[in-house]
Image: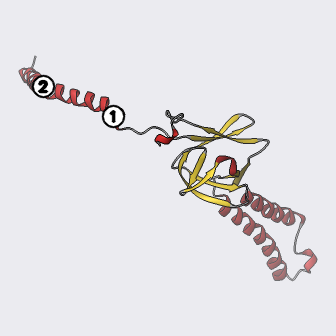
């Protein structure tokens, strides 16, 4: 065997044994920190669950954004700053969870509004292009458009309009959707301690 390899191997073991007290000290410190972590931790706040016919749809917790309509026909949008005592705090304003009439969810996988507007502009462009071509060729006005151009323009206009309307999904609380308040506070019988 190569003597250089043996000396490197021996050096590696000597360095490892020399650092062993520091390694044991580090392990002790990590164990102590993990043991003390629950003493400084905070308990989880309550949750509000949106259900459809009893099955889970969404969960709302502190720090999440929410757009809602109250039973007083007012829309509010903001961040949930707290959930406690059967109330949801939206930007610091308290609402009892039974005061929520509708929850609006914004779909973000597609750019619904921009794509819908682009489709509607394209539909109008097909009609404009037919008129410009008809004027350029000197055709009478009743021959500017073909059945295909009507179908294409109509499909683009209607598709764009539908796409802009699909940007938001509304959950009407009532027969189909319901809100459930989940109290996760371990001191639920002693509410004055909060």
The answer to whether residue 109 is visible is no
Say which quadrant the N terminus sits in. top left
Horizontal and vertical percent for residue 168? 69, 55
Using the rendered view, name the quadrant where residue 161 is placed.
bottom right
Residue at the spot of label 1: 37
- Is residue 125 or residue 138 the one in the foreground? 125
User: Compared with residue 129, is residue 18 higher up or lower down, i.e. above or below?
Assistant: above
Residue at the spot of label 2: 21
Residue at coordinates 52% horizontally, 47% vertically from top-left? 62
Horizontal and vertical percent for residue 27? 22, 27
Residue at coordinates 90% horizontally, 64% vertically from top-left? 147
Residue at coordinates 64% horizontally, 49% vertically from top-left? 96
Number of numbered callouts drawn: 2
Horizontal and vertical percent for residue 130? 82, 73
Query: For mark 2, does the 10 Å Cα neighbourhood hold few (<14), some (14 to 19), or many (20 or more) residues?
Result: few
Sequence-wise first label, 2 or 1: 2
The secondary structure type at the circle numbered 1 is helix
- Is residue 73 or residue 168 the one in the foreground? 73
Residue at coordinates 60% horizontally, 47% vertically from top-left? 87
- Is residue 45 or residue 63 the one in the foreground? 45
């Amino acid at each position: 065997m190569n003597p250089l390899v043996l000396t490197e191997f021996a050096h590696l073991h000597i360095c490892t044994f020399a650092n062993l007290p520091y390694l044991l000290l580090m392990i002790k410190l990590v164990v102590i920190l993990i043991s003390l972590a629950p003493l400084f931790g905070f308990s989880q706040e309550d949750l509000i669950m949106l259900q459809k016919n009893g099955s889970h749809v969404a969960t709302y917790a502190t720090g999440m954004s929410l757009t809602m309509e109250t039973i007083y026909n007012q829309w509010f949008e903001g961040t949930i700053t707290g959930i406690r005592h059967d109330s949801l705090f939206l930007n610091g304003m308290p609402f009892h969870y039974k005061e929520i009439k509708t929850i609006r969810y914004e779909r973000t996988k597609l750019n619904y509004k921009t794509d819908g507007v682009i489709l509607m502009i394209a539909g109008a462009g097909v009609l404009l292009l037919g008129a410009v071509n008809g004027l350029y060729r000197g055709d009478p006005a009743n021959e500017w458009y073909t059945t295909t151009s009507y179908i294409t323009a109509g499909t683009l206009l209607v598709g764009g309009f539908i796409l802009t309307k699909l940007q938001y999904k509304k959950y009407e609380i009532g027969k189909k959707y319901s809100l459930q308040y989940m109290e996760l506070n371990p001191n639920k019988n002693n509410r004055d301690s909060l």
